[in-house]
Amino acid sequence: MTAKNILLVEDNPDDAELAVRAFRSGGGGQELQVASDGVEAMEALFGSATSPPPRQLPALVLLDLKLPRLDGFDVLSRIRSHPRTRFLPVVILTSSTEVSDLIAGYRLGANSYVRKPMSYREFLVAAKLIADYWLALNELPPAGLAERAELEGRI
């Protein structure tokens, strides 16, 4: 598998470190960029007043729901509303067991909803499964192609 970038949006430093270690241990070679809140996630995807948007989007966003400044639902909604990120795979990775969060996540366009595993060993397994599917098997439209087709009214 070639290295692909992941944007991890996680405000809990311990959970972020656990996720980073688990994905790096999976051997897929993916790089993780960590955003500690929803505003940082938006800047990582779209740029800011002081920095341009990144040339390349991450291959996957792992998104917590309970975030400061801009919560995960708002982040997901903004990702799905922009042509550049509309098809970007978003996996909600949360400790929430609320059925309403599960339903809201899918209603807003999440591709998957995964509850954070409780142990490091379980997290390793989950990270490997997520990376194997979303980074190795899943196919996305070529960068820019879907956006152009949508702007031209073909999709």
Image: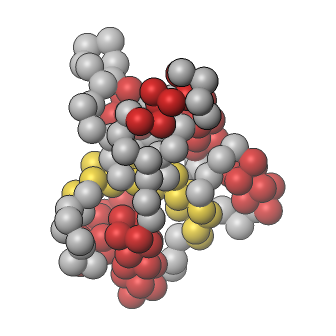
- Identify whether 122 is placed above or below 84: below
Which residue is at the far bottom? 121
**Residue shown at 24%/31% (left/top)?**
55
Horizontal placement of 115 versus 89: left or right? Answer: right
Q: Quadrant of residue 142?
A: top left
Residue 120 in view (yes/no): no
- 118 vs 28, nearest the viewer: 28
Q: Residue at x 20, y 65 (%)?
A: 2
Give the total number of marks visible in the rendering.
0
Which quadrant is home to the C terminus?
A: top right
Direction top: furthest residue: 49
Q: Give the colour scheme shown.
A: secondary structure
On screen, residue 67 above or below 18: above
Q: Is residue 118 visible?
A: yes
Q: Which residue is at 53% across, 58% downward?
A: 91
- Residue 32 at x, y percent in the picture: 27, 55
The one nearer the camera, 147 or 121, is 147
Residue 103 image position (x, y, % from top left): 78, 56
**Residue 11 x, y percent position in the rendering:** 44, 48
Quick check: 149 left or right of 125? right
**Residue at the front extreme?**
154
The image quarter in which residue 31 lies: bottom left
Which quarter of the image is occupied by the N terminus? bottom left
Query: Is 45 above or below relative to 123?
Result: above
Q: Which residue is drawn at 79% across and 62% down?
A: 99
Q: Where is residue 38 in the image (x, y as percent from the top left)?
A: 48, 36
Check the image and report above or below for 19 versus 41.
below
Q: Is residue 56 left or right of residue 8?
A: left
